[in-house]
Image: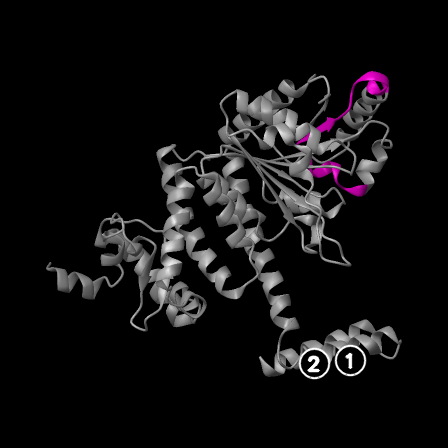
């Protein structure tokens, strides 16, 4: 079969065949309409490519094909954008922290064009990530740990002590700390990095504070993508610290391998944890500040939570949540916490639950992004945005019920969509 006939029978095969070339073609392919699409799939034979070709053809017929969707979202990239992406991608996989920081800033941008460029970068990083996992015999490249708890639980102090211990053991640690934004000014303090003075100076650690910008649960929609970038940058442990306000615990549990709940002593009995529904999400409960006069309260609350966990439904076949005491001030228990984490990781990997959990999480976050994007599209729809303030005033004055006002807006949206 000559080159021309191959290209006619397999129009995308020639594209994937050239993936190894160190040019911008590695990042995208161009359609007949002049649009550039990101991709990250590697293949080496026309025969094995047939299944992907059939999938794309089927999708195009139904109007939901990947190329059709990308064609509407990703226009051709300029030379400046191509140079930027080459720089960010190359620097990222080589472990340059400045490129990682710039890449995360790009995906956090709310600018429409920058969001499109960010998706091209993420697609390339995802392809690199998949290749590295294959070289690692299908095992995850990094261990993702979510950390949450009420204000004053000592999350930042624990992370600094814990992170320093990990870097001393030759691990590379990234910390994604999500800070609440003001509902009045929209500003955010971003003080976590300031509190982690020692860890922030460690060359094997990277701390990235991010504002919530009003996102429900304190976890931004780009946090999941920032985790991928950190792993692409060579960080084998990713710590996600969230705002401990209740909803954040559920949000972070859908993006990490292990969820750790940090609680201060004398923070209420075990019923407080059960009725909030937070404790059932935790794979490990850590009682902090177990030193000095707080040792006795710490022991008591540890015993109470051990009893509470026995009443909860078991979520894993191989792991039952543990309750531990630590003191970041004296360093007591910090090493034991890491031992429990590695035990959890090994058990979940061996049983296959960890990989299944990650696949499920990716689906959850896809739908989270869809919901957020649809709400934003709804608010800015030409037939709706002018009616929203009028109906809001009528609801506030008691003229219309919230349900009826919502029905009117949805009806206007459906009729013109």
Which quadrant is home to the C terminus?
bottom right
Q: Residues within 10 Å of mark 1 (few under 14, many from 20)?
A: few
Residue at far left of view: 2
- Residue 258 got which mark? none
> Nearest the camera: 185 or 36?
185
Task: Please give left or right for residue 342 compared with residue 10 in the image.
Answer: right
Q: Quadrant of residue 129?
A: top left
Query: Dot 1 lies on which element?
Result: helix
Which quadrant is home to the N terminus?
bottom left
Is residue 309 located in the magenta-colored stretch of the structure?
Answer: no
Residue 391 in the image: state x and y as whole percent: 78, 78
Q: Is residue 120 visible?
A: yes
Q: Quadrant of residue 39?
A: bottom left
Query: Dot 2 lies on which element?
Result: loop
Is residue 287 located in the magenta-colored stretch of the structure?
Answer: yes
Task: Please give left or right for residue 63 compared with residue 311 in the image.
Answer: left
Give the residue at x 76% y 77%.
389
Q: Is residue 113 above or below residue 238?
A: below
Q: Quadrant of residue 33?
A: bottom left
Residue 26 in the image: state x and y as whole percent: 30, 53
Residue 304 in the image: state x and y as whole percent: 82, 26
Q: Residues within 10 Å of mark 2 (few under 14, many from 20)?
A: few
Residue span colored magenta: 276-296
Query: Label 2, on which residue?
Result: 386
* Labels 1 and 2 touching (C-beta < 8 A): yes
Residue 181 in the image: state x and y as whole percent: 72, 52
Q: Is residue 129 visible?
A: no
Give the residue at x 54% y 51%.
105
- Residue 390 got which mark? 1
Q: CA distance from mark 1 to mark 2?
A: 8 Å
> Nearest the camera: 264 or 54?
264
Give the residue at x 64% y 66%.
375
């Amino acid at each position: 079969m000559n080159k021309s006939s191959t290209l006619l029978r397999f129009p995308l095969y020639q594209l994937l065949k050239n993936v190894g070339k160190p040019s911008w073609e590695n990042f995208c392919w161009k359609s007949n309409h002049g649009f550039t699409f990101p991709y990250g799939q590697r293949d080496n034979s026309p025969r094995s490519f047939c299944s992907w070709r059939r999938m794309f053809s089927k999708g195009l017929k139904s109007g939901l094909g990947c190329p059709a969707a990308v064609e509407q979202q990703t226009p051709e990239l300029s030379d400046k954008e191509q140079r930027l992406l080459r720089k960010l991608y190359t620097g990222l996989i080589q472990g340059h922290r400045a490129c990682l920081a710039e890449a995360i800033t790009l995906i956090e941008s709310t600018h429409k064009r920058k969001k499109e460029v960010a998706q091209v970068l993420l697609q390339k990083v995802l392809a690199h990530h998949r290749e590295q996992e294959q070289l690692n015999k299908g095992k995850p490249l990094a261990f993702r740990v979510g950390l949450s708890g009420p204000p004053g639980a000592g999350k930042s102090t624990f992370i600094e002590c814990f992170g320093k211990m990990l870097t001393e053991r030759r691990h590379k640690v990234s910390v994604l700390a999500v800070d609440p934004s003001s509902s009045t000014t929209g500003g955010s303090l971003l003080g976590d990095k300031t509190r982690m003075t020692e860890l922030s100076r460690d060359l094997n650690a990277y701390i990235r504070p991010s504002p919530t910008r009003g996102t429900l649960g304190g976890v931004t929609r780009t946090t999941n993508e920032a985790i991928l970038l950190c792993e692409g940058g060579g960080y084998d442990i990713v710590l996600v610290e969230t705002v401990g306000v209740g909803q954040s615990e559920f949000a972070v549990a859908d993006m990490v391998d292990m969820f750790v709940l940090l609680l201060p002593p004398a923070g209420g009995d075990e019923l407080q944890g059960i009725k909030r529904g937070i404790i059932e999400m935790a794979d490990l409960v850590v009682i902090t500040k177990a030193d000095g006069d707080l040792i006795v309260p710490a022991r008591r609350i540890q015993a109470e939570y051990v009893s509470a966990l026995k009443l909860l439904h078991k979520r894993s076949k191989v792991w039952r949540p543990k309750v531990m005491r630590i003191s970041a001030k004296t360093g007591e228990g910090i090493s034991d916490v890491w031992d429990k984490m590695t035990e959890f990781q090994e058990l979940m990997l061996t049983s296959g639950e960890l990989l299944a959990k990650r696949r499920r999480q990716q689906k959850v976050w896809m739908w989270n992004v869809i919901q957020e994007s649809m709400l934003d599209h709804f608010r800015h729809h030409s037939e709706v945005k002018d009616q929203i303030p009028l109906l809001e005033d009528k609801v506030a004055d008691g003229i219309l019920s919230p349900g009826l006002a919502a029905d009117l807006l949805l009806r206007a949206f459906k009729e013109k969509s």
